[in-house]
Image (cartoon, rainbow, N blue to C red):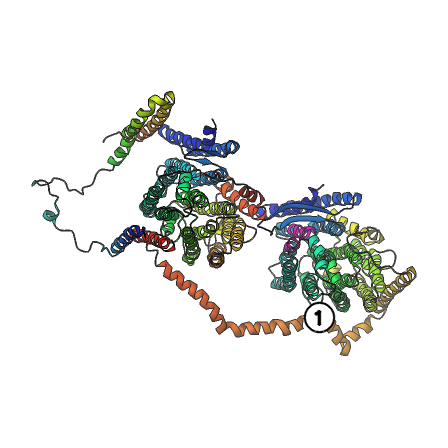
Amino acid sequence: MSLLALILVLILSLGAGLLLQALPRREHALPTYPQRAPFLGGGEPDTHAWSRYHVRYYPMALLLIAFEMEMMFMYPWAVVFVEKGAMAVMEMGMFLAILSVGIVYAWREGVFRWQ
Amino acid sequence: MTYLIALLPLILVCATAVAVMLGIAWQRHHASTVLTAVVGLNLALLSLVAVHQVAPFETLLVAVDGLAIFGAVLVLVSTLACATLAHAYLEHYRGPREEFYLLLLCAAAGGLVLVSSRHMATLFFGLELLSMPLYGMLAYAFHERRSLEAGIKYLVLSAAATAFLLFGMALAYAQTGRLDLAGLTAGLGEGGGAWGLAGAGLILVGLGFKLSLVPFHLWTPDVYEGGPGPAATFLASASKVAVVIVLLRLVIESPAFAHVGVHQILAVLAFASMLIGNLLALTQANLKRLLGYSSIAHFGYLLVALVVAEGLAVETAAVYLVMYVVTTLGAFGVVTLVSSRDISGDAAALHHYRGLFWRRPYLTAVLTVALLSLAGIPFTAGFIGKFYIVALGVEAGRWWLVGGLIVGSAIGLYYYLRVMVTLYLVEPGMQRHDAPHDWGTRAGGVVVLGLAALVVLLGVYPTPIIEWAAALGVAHG
Amino acid sequence: MSFLLPLTFLLPLAGTLLLSLSRGRLGERASAAIGTASVGLSALATAALIAGYLEAPERQVVTLWTWVSVGDFQPTLGLALDGLSLTLLGVITGVGLLIHLFAAWYMRGESGITRFYAYMNLFVFSMVLLVLGDNLLLLFLGWEGVGLCSYLLIGYYYRTAANGWAAFKAFIVTRVGDVFLAIGLFLLFRELGTLNIAQLLERAPQLWAEGAPTVELAALLLLGGALGKSAQLPLHTWLADAMAGPTPVSALIHAATMVTAGVYLIARMHELFLLAPDVLLLTGVIGALTLLAAGFAALAQTDIKRVLAYSTMSQIGYMFLALGAGAFDAAIFHLMTHAFFKALLFLSAGAVIVSCHHEQDMRRLGGLWRKLPLAYAGFVVGGAALAALPLVTAGFYSKDEILWQALAAGHGGLLVAGLVGAFLTSIYTLRLIIKTFHGEAKSDNARHAEAGQGLAHGVPLIVLMVLSTFLGAWLTPPLAGVLPDPHEGSAGWHTALEIVASLVALGGLALAAWLFLRRRKWLAEQTSQGWGARLWRWWHHAWGFDTAYDRGLVRPYWRTVHALRSDRVDGLFGLVAIMVRMTHLGLSWTQTGKLRFYGLSMVGGATLVILVLALVR
């Protein structure tokens, strides 16, 4: 009976899922502007929270992974670096090389051109 | 050194992916991209010979044994077929074509990881590496609503399935404190605790989604229909093969999966998949959807081998997988080739195939052979696979499953024959023979013709596959 | 040497594939060349096999591969070569080659030559498989394959509806026999646990005593299959209509090879039949009845090919008679010589038909012997062999052997039937020759006959002519050790029988000569009025079997089908379909296309999984 909790969770999500089925396809229109304006410390926001971003931000976000996220791996790598020696340098080198291929690709695809 | 050799196929495929990416960055060129991808995949396939010399080879994360090599061959062959088909398919595509191969190679790498994984980390990693590029591949023709829909549907549901999978892994970890298969086996012992069992159940849900077993099957037809031909082909062949191999490994090795409850669940899933998959296909008017339903049913059949999980189970599953992959590639190959001439969307509705025989006799012959094989008619590959499953089920006394298989096959025959009849109908005022004259010598044509020949050949002379399957060594953790 | 054995059927298969995949791009000559060459190479391989076998006569088994192996069930794809199959193999490829060659002449100018040769090669492939298979499953595969080819080739001129119906008839009637055969195979497999012929024949005597009901039943079922394929009573009605196909087809399939498959089957399974003496006797009786019935029918035919068709039935009747008398080797010997002289007769008939602008009604021919000397010679030599003219013909030796064995085995009735049959054979053979070649030409087609020319026309006829003489009888099938030894008897009786048989054959010829040359008017009067006319009509319609079957089987069947069209019982079965359809509709509802519902079903599935696990634990 130790699974009771799990079953409970699942049944709850099942219920939630069932409710979702009945979810109306946005029955009434959204409230008018002042009511749905996000609260901004008393001031009026100049853009809406749901405003659209330009699609070029998405490749930028992806690039962040290529440029910055490898740093995350570098911390644990730094810990074992002394222990492993040249092998570790090589491995990190390969990793960075592959990542930089991604950057080259993005560059050639014109992600960095800002227009 | 052994380490490098054992991982050579994976390294080669990844290197090819990087090379393709660099190639695209340097200069876009469709044919040379395909060439690079195909050469890389072939090299990987060749390197399996070397891998065979060092097998079995095990590390904490991967086990390169007979089963893994077997799976790798199937994954690589399917990927190769997909790459060649994609070449024909994307010829007239207006958007960028080259990235498709990049995604394909990444997914293949994921498949290679998956078939040799013996650790929850590699399992998860492989599964995700396999699935992530598939989202992109399915939504590749993103200016078409259906393709986009397929990609998004698969993305959302696959993420949900992954959540179940991860939850299951977490529960198993909570029970045993280990994540490698050997450790799990030791930790769970006979029967396993409640949480270990629940973990097994949830992992099953996650993998069952990928195999589109009932009741996790609902996405299949929509995604197959919407995705571009080669992507659907990959989804139906390589992706499923890799997942089946993982499941096979789990069922054989892990005691949590040997629990009677899990077996019963597997049996129920198998039974439901066979019947419901076939029933859903009954009046389907879209060939790709129909093939999707049929794949649900086929994995229901295959699951019988996993339910029995003793005696000839591994051999049966392996034989069935080969037969299924060859046949499915043939069927999807024809759909892809017919579609590739049609620039606006895939030609998958049955009316596209009315009287196809009178226009493109060879392609129709290939499709006919593939459908016969799917239906399990003797002297086709499909028969051998089905025969093995039935023999295994009878041997193990799983009468319900055997009954379900037979009823399912009977229903299946109806809709396969319906398609076949359509192929040969004579339509008034139709044009004759509109295929370009050199189609047979093009890569795509050669591939489907070869596959059809293989389907017949394996139906008549299955010995090599059977011997191979019988000799599969599974490294025990 | 073992690689030669598969080559004998792989080459014709390759020919078929090549021809059928050419998509009509091959010309007439290329098609004929490919079709003939593949069989020719196969014949060469056979010749090498024969040479090897004569050097070291041993049974050769080549196991190609095991098809599937699940537990004890391991059907192997194996070939077995012994004297029996070698004899058949030689006939199929040798005579087959000659007929393929002749067809190159016969079929020129026809449309669809590629199709013709593709079917013919497929036939040779199936037939070789039939005789080489070392298990009954493979034999059955070949059996069905030749049936299919027979169907395809009878209906070769498919633009005429009647030919299509003839093909239908042949297919359906032989199918009746095939069903018996299939049930027989099931029975054998259930009882003996194998379909491998060698194992089967080894286990059968251990399991069954002579005359045990099961073995009688099994033999009876096999006999049913043989009767259908070999056009014996009561499943003989298809053969005469099968003449709708091109003449080389009639020569190859409906005279020399396929129709004798039943004889081969029984000879191959003779140990089983020896365990079932009643069925063996029945075989002989059916053979005797068929040979008489077909002999009378042949007397009253007007179409050249139909005469030959009935004479084929009659000659196969002899073979069945021999089988029934336990003289298996005599049956196979007659099978071989019959293949020679009947192929010769059919090819000569083909030569006449083409020369006379596709006129094959004997009443409209005549006076051809000067114009078509080669065809005439073929008819004379072949006819002499058919009528078993003493000493100089191949047919004499084989038929004599059959009659002698019937006597030695003590089957007096069979012997008498055989002698009467021989008498009839002489009469209808001479009638055929006289009507076709002598007298005056009775139509423009016959008057303007053009003799065939070229090697493809001449060579097969001449070779077969040589083989139909006593030279052909020198080719003794190497059957020792394969089939039981023939009965021994006193040499004196043998000589006496030979003399009697010769006198009967000569008597028949004399009577025919007298009737058809001297008393032609009288004969015409007799057959056009009163009882004579009735008898003539009766024989012309081959004892009215067709009408009887039509009235007794076909029409009641149609009526039943018609009556059952709105059948309640059928509704019960329809219910299954309706149920499946309803379920399908019910399930289709789940394919909403909505992501949220798909997600829900996944959660639902997971809940069920965990619930089951919690409950089972």
Crowdedness of circle 1 by 10 Å Cα count: few (<14), some, many (20+)? some
Magenta-span inclusion, residue C343: no
Q: Choose between C119 and A49: the one closer to the eye.
A: A49
Q: Is residue C138 magenta?
A: yes
Q: Where is residue C389 in the image (x, y as percent from the top left)?
A: 85, 60
> Which residue, given by chain and number where applicable, does mark 1 sit on?
C541
Chain that bears disc 1: C
Task: Judge whether residue B90 can be spotted in this image.
Answer: yes
In this image, C355 relative to B378: left or right?
right
Image position, residue B189 (x, y; %): 41, 44
Rendered view: B235 above or below C241: above
Which quadrant is the N terminus of chain C positioned in?
top right
Q: Main secondary structure of the magenta part?
A: helix
Residue C200, quarter of picture: bottom right
Front residue (pair B73, B433) = B73
Q: Which is more toward the observer, B403 or B226?
A: B403
**Where is residue C124 drawn, in percent x and y?**
67, 51
Looking at the rendering, which quadrant does residue B159 occupy?
top left
As drawn, is C401 to the left or to the right of B419?
Answer: right
Q: In this view, does C424 lie above or below C474?
A: below
Asked if residue C29 is positioned above or below residue B276 in the image, the reply reads above
Residue at image location 76% in from the left, 48% down from the top: C459
Residue B292 location in percent, x, y? 41, 51
Between B122 and C411, the residue placed more toward the observer is B122
Three-letter amino acid code at the position of disc 1: His
Q: Which stretch appears magenta?
A: C120-141
Q: Residue C391 is drawn in which quadrant? A: bottom right
Mark 1 residue element: loop
